[in-house]
């Protein structure tokens, strides 16, 4: 398991270093794949097919979550810009209580009305409406700009999702290819060891020359070297 981990880590780092324009993203993505493959456990690893890996990457990738959140921010800004066309309506209600008689009584009585004092407790209510007059097109241009920004953010998030899934599929296929090569080389090494034993027996009875065993041993060393290169 430790040897397999080193093999996978080496392959993932090589794929990440060859990518252009996404250094931080691919670094996080590599860590995510390592977690998915090796921290999940043996039971989970048995069902870690390509579809499951792509689903986990799309669900847990931090960069993709950030891109979707950024898209939501621009969508909210677009909604705010659209709401400005509707204007504003305000309703208010207030109460006042005066304790100082000098402030609640008039300085001089009205001319035609009796000299009544002001009430100490007063109520007030009202409302206001503001309708936009977009003569210079400022609101309209602001809404169009917000719409384009929201569309750009959505496109960037979708592009990032496709890039992540493509990288995940490529890395997964690369791991499958390495695993297949390792399995084939292991079988080839086992076959060569069996041939070497047969050759040693044949050499003892004089059926073949000793050079044949040396040739098989050389082939075995080549195969073992290729296996070591996959670690």
Image (cartoon, rainbow, N blue to C red):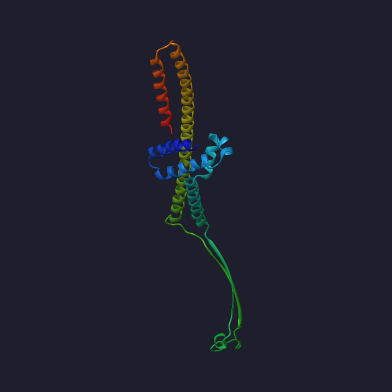
Residue at image point 45% right, 11% down: 205
Residue at image point 47% right, 33% down: 175
Identify whether 195 is placed above or below 165.
Answer: above
Identify whether 110 is placed above or below 204.
Answer: below
Quadrant of the drawing holding the C terminus:
top left
Residue at image point 55% right, 65% down: 90
> How far from the left and from the top, in percent, is residue 221?
40, 25
Task: Find the residue positioned furthest to the front.
Answer: 204
Callout count: 0
Q: Nearer the viewer, residue 123 or 45?
A: 45
Q: Nearer the viewer, residue 66 or 9?
A: 9
> How far from the left and from the top, in percent, is residue 161?
48, 41
Q: Nearer the viewer, residue 207 or 156?
A: 207
Residue at image point 49% right, 27% down: 183
Identify whether 213 is placed above or below 147.
Answer: above
Task: Find the residue positioned furthest to the top.
Answer: 207
Residue 138 at least partly seen: yes
**The quadrant where residue 209 appears:** top left
> How far from the left and from the top, in percent, is residue 219?
40, 21
Identify whether 104 is placed above or below 191.
Answer: below
């Amino acid at each position: 398991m430790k040897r397999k981990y080193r093999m996978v880590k080496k392959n993932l780092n090589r794929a990440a270093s060859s990518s252009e324009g996404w250094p931080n993203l691919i670094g996080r993505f590599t860590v995510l794949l390592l977690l998915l493959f090796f921290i999940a456990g043996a039971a989970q690893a048995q069902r870690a097919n390509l579809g499951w890996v792509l689903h986990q990457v799309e669900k847990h990738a931090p960069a993709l979550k950030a891109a979707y959140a950024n898209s939501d921010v621009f969508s909210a800004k677009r909604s705010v810009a659209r709401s400005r066309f509707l204007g504003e309506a305000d309703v208010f209600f207030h109460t006042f209580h005066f304790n100082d008689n000098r402030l609640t009584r008039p300085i001089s009585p009205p001319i035609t009305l009796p000299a009544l004092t002001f009430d100490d407790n007063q109520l007030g209510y009202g409302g206001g409406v503001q309708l936009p007059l977009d003569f210079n097109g400022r609101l309209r241009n602001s809404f169009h700009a917000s719409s384009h920004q929201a569309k750009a953010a959505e496109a960037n998030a979708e592009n990032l999702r496709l890039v992540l899934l493509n990288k995940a599929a490529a890395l997964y296929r690369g791991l499958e290819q390495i695993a297949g090569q390792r399995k084939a080389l292991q079988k080839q090494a086992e076959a060569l060891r069996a041939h070497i034993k047969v050759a040693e027996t044949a050499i003892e009875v004089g059926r073949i020359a000793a050079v044949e065993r040396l040739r098989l041993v050389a082939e075995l060393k080549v195969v073992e070297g290729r296996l070591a290169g996959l670690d």
